[in-house]
Structures are given as C-alpha cells and as structure tokens.
Amino acid sequence: MLGLDDIIDDYSSLSSERRWFISAFGGIIMCKLSYEFTGIVTPFIFKDFTKLNKAQKLEWKNRGFSTFHALFVAIASLYFLLISDLFDENVHDELIVYRKSTLSETILGVFS
C-alpha cells in the first residue's frame, strides 16, 4: 500500500507539465466543490437565502466560491513568504522571480 511519502515522491518525479495539468484539474474540482458547498451551507446560516431568486442564488454561490479561493491563496502566499525559505534571500543564490518548488507550482496550477 502506498503511503503519503510515496505519493508525494511519485508526484514530485512527474514532469512540470503533468504536475500543472493535475493541479489545474484539482483546482477545477475544488472550485466546483466549494461552489456546491456554499449552496448547501448557506441556508443553515442565512434563512433568507431560500427566498432569493435563481439569479441571486447563483451570484451568492459565486461569491462564496470567490471567498474560498481568496482565503486559500492568501494562506498559501503567507506560507511562502513567512514560513518557507523559498523566498529567503539568504538561502538561495538565484533571483527571487526564478525560484520555484513543486509545492509552489502545484498551488499556482490549482488556483489558476
């Protein structure tokens, strides 16, 4: 049985193009799930959601997805800026704009 470390190693060994495709497809799935989740959870939080017409519900769910996306992009950005050493100027010799990692490429693919 494959462990998480094996899966991560297998994923890291893929070409950049394949990782990009997998992460972009994963991003599409996450978008759909967050869109549907917004529509399921909202009526329990805001009772007037059920009174909205179809166009207003669509707009509300789009905003829910957008908020979900913004939160995860912000969390990923904070991780790279504050916790990871990827953008630490004292660790790497190359220019900051050329630095990348498997995780940074994956997050870029997911949120593109």
Image: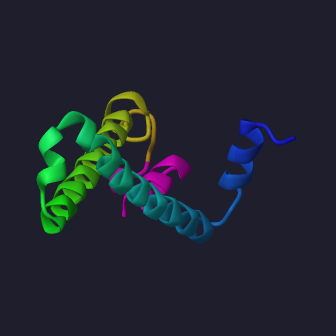
88 in the magenta segment = no
Give me the residue at 24% from left, 50% from top. Answer: 64
Q: In this rendering, does residue 3 appear at all?
A: yes
Asked whether 46 or 107 is in front, the reply is: 46
Give me the residue at 43% from left, 40% from top. Answer: 86
* The N terminus: image quadrant: top right
Asked whether 9 or 56 is in front, the reply is: 56
Percent of width and height locating residue 33: 43, 54
Horizontal side of residue 2 vs 41, given as left or right = right
Query: For the image shown, how many numbered marks are present on the structure?
Result: 0
Horizontal side of residue 84 vs 68, given as left or right = right
Horizontal side of residue 91 vs 65, given as left or right = right
Percent of width and height locating residue 101: 51, 50
Q: Looking at the image, which residue sits at the far right?
A: 1
* The C terminus: image quadrant: bottom left
Q: Looking at the image, which residue sits at the far front?
A: 51
Q: In this rendering, does residue 98 appear at all?
A: no
Percent of width and height locating residue 111: 37, 58
Chosen colour scheme:
rainbow
Give me the residue at 73% from left, 37% from top. Answer: 5
Give me the residue at 68% from left, 62% from top. Answer: 14
* Occupied quadrant, residue 93: top left
Q: Is residue 69 above or below residue 32?
A: above
Which region of the structure is painted magenta? 94-112
Prevailing SS of the magenta stretch:
helix
106 in the magenta segment = yes
Horizontal side of residue 39 vs 47, given as left or right = right
